[in-house]
Image (cartoon, grey):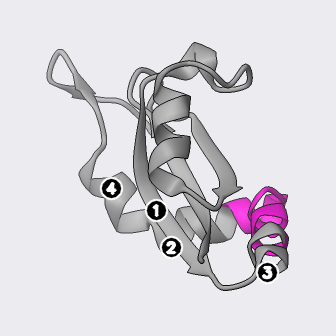
Amino acid sequence: MFYYVYVLQSLRFKDKLYIGSTPDLKKRVAKHNAAVNFSTRAYAPWRLIFYESYLYKEDALRREKYLKTNKGSRVIKNMLRDYFYHTRSTVSGRKIKSNF
């Protein structure tokens, strides 16, 4: 059994990311999109943009905790730099400045 650390991006608010961990990735993403989770309800629907898998729950929890720190947040945004560059939103032909 694997344990997953994942990053979600809100489809409504492109600058909102959520980092979490779970043993069942499909079910967890479905719960986020069904607005079951209080902390992510306001920003649903979500898109899974990144995940890592671990054999041990403790390793996944340690990685999740790190990615939620200031330094970890910078690391994940740097790892996904090309994704954020290619998915920048446009409104009325103007590019919206991204926080990433």
Q: Are marks 4 and 1 in contact (CB under 8 Å)?
A: no
**Magenta run includes residue 70:** yes
Report the amino acid beneath label 3.
Asp
Does the magenta stretch mainly form a helix, a strand or a loop?
A: helix
Within 10 Å of disc 1 (Cα), the crowding (few <14, some 14-19, many 20+) is: some
For marks 2 and 1, the one nearer the N-term is 1
Q: Which residue is mark 1?
A: 50
Q: Is residue 62 above or below residue 43?
A: below
Q: Residue at x 79, y 80 (%)?
A: 59
Q: Is residue 88 left or right of residue 52?
A: left
For marks 4 and 1, the one nearer the N-term is 1
User: Could you tell me residue 25's position as x and y percent?
Assistant: 51, 55
Q: CA distance from mark 1 to mark 3?
A: 17 Å
Asked if residue 99 shows in the view, the reply is no
Q: Residue at x 25, y 54 (%)?
A: 86
- Which residue range is magenta in the image? 62-73
Q: Residue at x 50, y 73 (%)?
A: 79
Report the amino acid beneath label 2.
Met
Q: Which residue is mark 2?
A: 79
Report the amino acid beneath label 1.
Phe
> Dot 2: what SS?
helix
Q: Which residue is mark 4?
A: 85
**Magenta run includes residue 30:** no
Label number found at residue 59 = 3
